[in-house]
Image (spheres, rainbow, N blue to C red):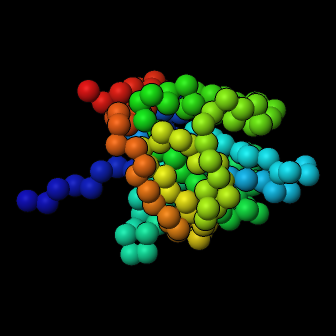
Amino acid sequence: MTVPEPEPATEPVDVDDFRAAMSRLAAGVVLITAHDADDEPRGEDIGMTATAFLSVSLEPPLVLVSVREGSRMDELLERQPRWAASVLSESQRHIAGRFALRGRISDRLLFEDISYYRGEASGAPVLGGALAILECETEQRVRAGDHTLIVGRVLTARTPSADGGPLTYFRGRYRYLR
């Protein structure tokens, strides 16, 4: 018995339907950071919350993060190849919310009362209390719709904190694993 091939879709997918469907996929939450040495005399630290972050390869160790095309982070990572990813714990929900805000003017205030240190390999801010820390160097940039997919070679990987569970994102809200 031959199964007929499905008819190709004639209508584009509704953006709200797509968003609702993808919101059913639970994701880990990370803070992507980089140091912009070209900004002002001392430079400036930049950060963004990401839920589209994943492991790509073990040999070599590669990760991927998706950033909005034309965003401040996208523009910085186009000229600054080194960056860090801090995997957020459930106690760092306030940090995720803070760095997810749109239309902010300066990241300097966002870092002001957060515990962090400078990564040795990337020079980027690395969060204290994060479940895992990855310092990366961009290997490839791929334009994909309204985002840029950034593939980074992992330079260092650490798991400094064993306390607490991961912060997750599901159905448009930050959640905790129980």
In the rendered image, residue 47, in percent from the top left (x then y), is placed at: 66, 43
Confirm whether residue 99 shows in the render.
yes
The residue lying toward the viewer, choosing from 161 and 175, is 161
The residue lying toward the viewer, choosing from 91 and 22, is 91
Compared across the picture, whether 98 is left or right of 1 comes to right
In the rendered image, residue 35, in percent from the top left (x then y), is placed at: 73, 53
Say if 154 sits above or below 114 in the image. Answer: below
In the rendered image, residue 91, in percent from the top left (x then y), is placed at: 45, 28
Say if 103 sits above or below 140 in the image. Answer: above
The residue lying toward the viewer, choosing from 174 and 22, is 174
Q: How many marks?
A: 0
Confirm whether residue 51 shows in the render.
no
In the rendered image, residue 125, in percent from the top left (x then y), is placed at: 64, 48
Residue beneath the point at 75% across and 37% down: 107
Residue beneath the point at 74% across and 46% down: 45
Residue beneath the point at 59% across and 71% down: 139
Residue found at the very far bottom of the displayed protein: 59
Compared across the picture, whether 91 is left or right of 136 comes to left
Compared across the picture, whether 121 is left or right of 131 comes to right
Residue beneath the point at 42% across and 63% down: 56
Say if 63 sits above or below 43 in the image. Answer: below
Compared across the picture, whether 40 is left or right of 155 comes to right
Give the quarter of the figure containing the N terminus. bottom left
Residue found at the very far left of the displayed protein: 1
- The quarter holding residue 97 reads top right
Give the quarter of the figure containing the C terminus. top left
